[in-house]
């Protein structure tokens, strides 16, 4: 009597699972680039409704973000049931495209 298995060893589904698990483990242990650099000199601007925190070299961007946030608040506060008292924002180099 011969014993046979219907399952093939090394199917493409198995390979995809192994690659996916390996990729997840690699990504899990990689350093995160989105972390706040501890050696930066940070500044904050407080407006009526926002506190904008930014690295010193992005002061122009921080001021623009604070102005835009207040403009948006004025426009949106009429639509909000209970507008928040104060919110925090932290613009980055990548925020320049949005401002």
Image: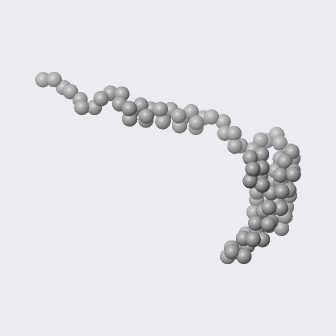
Q: Quadrant of the C terminus?
A: bottom right
Q: Is residue 19 left or right of residue 32?
A: left
The total number of labels drawn is 0
Residue at the far top in the pictured view: 2
- The spot of residue 50 in percent (x, y) is 79, 63
- The spot of residue 56 in percent (x, y) is 87, 47
Is residue 76 visible in the rendered image? The answer is yes
Q: Is residue 90 above or below residue 11?
A: below
Is residue 43 visible in the rendered image? The answer is no
Q: Nearer the viewer, residue 2 or 92?
A: 92
Q: Is residue 44 above or below residue 94?
A: below
Look at the image and name its color scheme.
one colour
Residue shown at 75%/44% (left/top)? 36
Residue shown at 12%/23% (left/top)? 1
Q: Nearer the viewer, residue 64 or 97?
A: 97
- The spot of residue 46 in percent (x, y) is 85, 61
Residue shown at 47%/32% (left/top)? 19
Residue shown at 79%/66% (left/top)? 71
């Amino acid at each position: 009597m011969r014993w046979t298995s219907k399952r093939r060893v090394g199917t493409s589904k198995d390979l995809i699972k192994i690659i996916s698990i390996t990729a997840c483990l690699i990504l899990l242990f990689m350093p995160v680039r989105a972390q706040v650099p501890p050696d930066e000199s940070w500044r904050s601007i407080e407006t009526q409704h926002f506190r904008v925190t930014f690295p010193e070299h992005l002061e122009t961007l921080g001021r623009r973000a604070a102005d835009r946030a207040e403009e948006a608040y004025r426009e949106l506060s009429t639509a909000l049931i209970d507008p928040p008292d104060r919110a925090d924002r932290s613009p980055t180099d990548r925020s320049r495209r949005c401002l």
